[in-house]
Image (cartoon, helix red, strand yellow):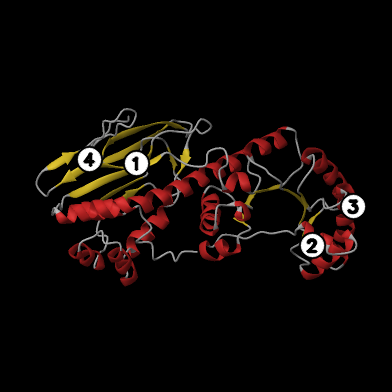
Amino acid sequence: MVEEKNFALLTDLYELTMCASYFDSKVKDVATFDLFIRQLPKNRSYFVAAGLEDVLDYLKNLKFTEEHIEFLKSKNIFKGDFLNYLKNFKFTGDVFAVPEGTIIFPNEPVLSVTAPIIEAQLVETFLLNAINLQTTIATKASRVVLAARQKPVVDFSLRRTQGADAGMKAARASYIAGCIGTSNVLAGMKYKIPIYGTMAHSFVMAFEKEEESFEAYSKTFPDASTFLVDTYDTLAGIENASIAAKKLEKQGHKLIAIRLDSGDLVSLSKTARKILDKNGLKYVSIFASGNLDEYKIEELLRKNSMIDVFGVGTSMGVSSDAPYCDVVYKLVELSDGGKLLPTMKLSKGKVTYPGKKQVYRIVDRKGSYAGDILALRDENAAIG
């Protein structure tokens, strides 16, 4: 994994070449860039902002090391005076942003950067990368959490995300969006997120009999066991879990849950609830996983499944149906210290609004969002 405080070269080449030309031409204007999402995917009605913490950490620690400078020098692209400038580079600008977890909509700034133009330009790529990934995942996770109707959701996505860094960000973004925790232990340590886990089919298969695997696991974790019951015959697995749970009771402990990972989760969860309750195990929760997303969870609840907790992996961790945001970073204002120049892009389908902005959110009497007003930052928008 890349060291997080060493991201100076995690940028597109043209950011550096533009900055070199600004430097060469002695362009020192203060620039304001807006980072926003152009449009909603077909199956989204909102976004959940995420990634700001990484952005601020990056800006605070951004610097070019000797190794960076030597690499750039070896490309024979940049002049020596620009490389000397980079040796002492530090971001000195200001960032205005919505808090992480905020509901946002297209064409509203997620964040704005005001800084000398070289500084504001240089950071574009990282900011887009950080906001795009985490906002995409947080939005998907929010949809999953809402579909679960206040039943807990745990992030199980690490093994299917596109690399280690994405796995970390998915855990963080899903937690921001309302998941109760993650299976990702490193994310739990770094981000102070609660960690959850059960057992794999391989653990059950490592014992001659299924019930032996349950007894072995509960011996190690008498107060923190969840039994995976669908390795062989699910109904038999539920019965075996019930027997193991009663043995735990006699020892003064309680089984936390059983986990269903395949099959007809509606029917199986109802049967599992009956078997557990019949054995005096009403306190044992039913945990479900297995290629779940918001649509499947909604269907499970519509059919009155008896599932108490959902473990959601691939679909949420990669936002499979909408894997990116149409996020952009556009120049909206220049100032040379005396003259203020609002700027806007006029390309067909990509027109931008000029000037520093503020979003005013209107809430109706029921507490629901009624609409947003996009105004200039110093404008007193009438929202009464």
- Mark 3–mark 2 distance (CA, rounded to whole Å): 18 Å
Residue type at mark 3 is Glu
Q: Residue at x 26, y 53 (%)?
A: 17
Residue type at mark 1 is Pro
| Apparent side of residue 240 relative to residue 223 in the rendered image (left or right) | right
Which sits earlier in the primary sequence, circle 1 or circle 2?
A: 1
Which disc number belongs to residue 203? 2
Q: Looking at the image, do the residues carrying marks 4 and 3 touch, with CB atoms under 8 Å apart?
A: no
Q: Residues within 10 Å of mark 4 (few under 14, many from 20)?
A: few
Q: Nearer the viewer, mark 3 or mark 2?
A: 2
What residue is shown with label 1?
Answer: 109
Which sits earlier in the primary sequence, circle 2 or circle 4?
A: 2
Q: Looking at the image, do the residues carrying marks 1 and 2 touch, with CB atoms under 8 Å apart?
A: no
Q: Nearer the viewer, mark 1 or mark 2?
A: 2
Q: Residues within 10 Å of mark 2 (few under 14, many from 20)?
A: some
Quadrant of the rendered structure where residue 371 is? top left
Q: Residue at x 27, y 65 (%)?
A: 73
Residue 217 drawn above or below residue 111: below
Q: Position of residue 42 (x, y in %)?
A: 51, 30
Quadrant of the rendered structure where residue 23 is? bottom left
